[in-house]
């Protein structure tokens, strides 16, 4: 064999070796993952927000994959993330995966190399804006921050069409939102408002005796119970409260862009039960489960929730990930908004 031919073959084999390493492994089937997960026997994950939206899914998951004990801890994303960071520093993870509103945590964890890459079946159906190209993290649901009002206190014709409508004297002392300095989604919401209407809007809004609490569930319950009449900080929790029979209804703004925020998931590379985590995320992201979320799915092949149009039909603000990953801007905005609302004093909850 000539030297030139040997060199060519060596080059080809080198390329094949490189591509065999660089190419992502084929997605494992759920049956394959289940066989491995059964040897682990458990799954532990943290969820930002209440655990109620997952209870039905967890029951379905355990029926579909018996033999796996599932433990879920709910709470504020910006509290649970600190707990995970403590575990990472101690190099002793108790948690396998997380579902958080704070997507910036996953961006940081990917940068630190502590996340496990996973591209389950159907990953190509997730809109590129809602997934990491390497599969380190992915959006599991997309929420719109709509208006919500108590139907016994506010007539449909009186529901504001834009943020300016909430400055009317008729709403004095009857408005509620999360603290923008405490909740990233609400911070993004208020940021879109002051970007359009200026910082004078905050002075006027606070002067209208608006109330602030922790957690969107507290906001929705307050409007549903009639303690407050309306909010422009409504999320899917408002719809959940409505399903309990409370007189609360959600509507999209007719004039302002509706902010979107996401719930993001990632699996930790040194998770105690990595295959159980892979199995759950693969199952949860499948079209069947994504069609039952009650909110918008990041999958392009899943229809919108009943009664709603596709997200592309609405005027939306979809810069949440870029917004929350700008740490310097975030810190300045929290401080500035807190100067209007004051510090968190009336604690809310997620359960």
Image (spheres, helix red, strand yellow):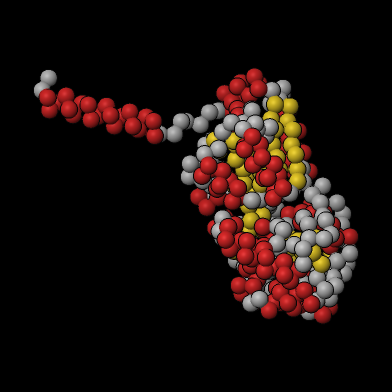
Q: Position of residue 259 (x, y in %)?
A: 64, 62
Q: Quadrant of residue 190?
A: bottom right
| Residue under the image location 64 percent in, 51 percent down | 102
Point out the image quarter for the N terminus: top left
Q: Is residue 21 above or below residue 330?
A: above
Q: Is residue 150 above or below residue 46?
A: below
Give left or right: position of 174 versus 276. Answer: right
Residue nearest the viewer, comparing 348 with 32: 348
Q: Is residue 346 visible in this depiction of the protein? A: yes
Q: Quadrant of residue 213?
A: bottom right
Give left or right: position of 164 versus 12. Answer: right
Residue nearest the viewer, comparing 55 with 321: 321
| Residue under the image location 70 percent in, 48 percent down | 77
Give left or right: position of 271 versus 239. Answer: left
| Residue under the image location 62 percent in, 43 percent down | 265
Residue nearest the viewer, comparing 79 with 350: 79
Q: Position of residue 140 (x, y in %)?
A: 62, 45
| Residue under the image location 56 percent in, 47 percent down | 108
């Amino acid at each position: 064999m000539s030297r030139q031919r040997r060199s060519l073959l060596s080059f080809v084999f080198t390329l094949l070796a490189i591509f065999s390493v660089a190419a992502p492994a084929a997605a494992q089937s759920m049956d394959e993952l289940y066989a491995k997960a059964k040897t682990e026997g458990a799954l532990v994950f943290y969820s930002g927000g209440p655990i109620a939206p997952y209870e039905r899914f967890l029951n379905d998951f355990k029926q579909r994959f018996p033999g796996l004990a599932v433990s879920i801890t709910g709470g504020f994303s910006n509290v649970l993330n600190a707990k995970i960071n403590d575990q990472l520093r101690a190099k002793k993870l108790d948690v396998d995966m997380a579902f958080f509103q704070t997507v910036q945590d996953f961006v940081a964890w990917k940068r630190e190399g502590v996340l496990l890459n996973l591209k389950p079946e159907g990953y190509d159906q997730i809109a590129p804006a809602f997934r990491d190209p390497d599969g380190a993290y992915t959006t599991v649901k997309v929420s719109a921050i709509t208006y919500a009002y108590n139907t016994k206190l506010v007539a449909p014709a009186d529901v504001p069409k834009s943020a300016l409508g909430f400055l009317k004297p008729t709403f004095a002392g009857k408005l509620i939102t999360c603290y923008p300095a405490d909740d990233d989604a609400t911070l993004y919401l208020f940021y879109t408002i002051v970007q359009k209407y200026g910082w004078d809007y905050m002075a006027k809004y606070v002067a209208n005796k608006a109330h602030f609490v922790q957690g969107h569930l507290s906001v929705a319950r307050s409007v549903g119970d009639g303690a407050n009449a309306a909010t422009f900080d409504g999320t899917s929790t408002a719809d959940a409260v409505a399903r309990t029979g409370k007189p609360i209804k959600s509507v999209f703004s007719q004039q302002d862009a509706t902010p979107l925020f996401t719930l993001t998931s990632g699996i930790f590379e040194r998770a105690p039960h990595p295959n159980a985590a892979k199995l759950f995320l693969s199952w949860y992201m499948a079209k069947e489960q994504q069609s039952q979320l009650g909110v918008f799915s990041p999958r392009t092949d899943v229809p919108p929730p009943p009664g709603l149009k596709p997200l592309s039909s609405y005027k939306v603000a979809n810069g949440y990930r870029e917004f929350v990953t700008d740490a310097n801007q975030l810190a300045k905005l929290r401080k500035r908004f807190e100067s209007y609302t004051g510090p968190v004093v009336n604690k809310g909850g997620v359960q």
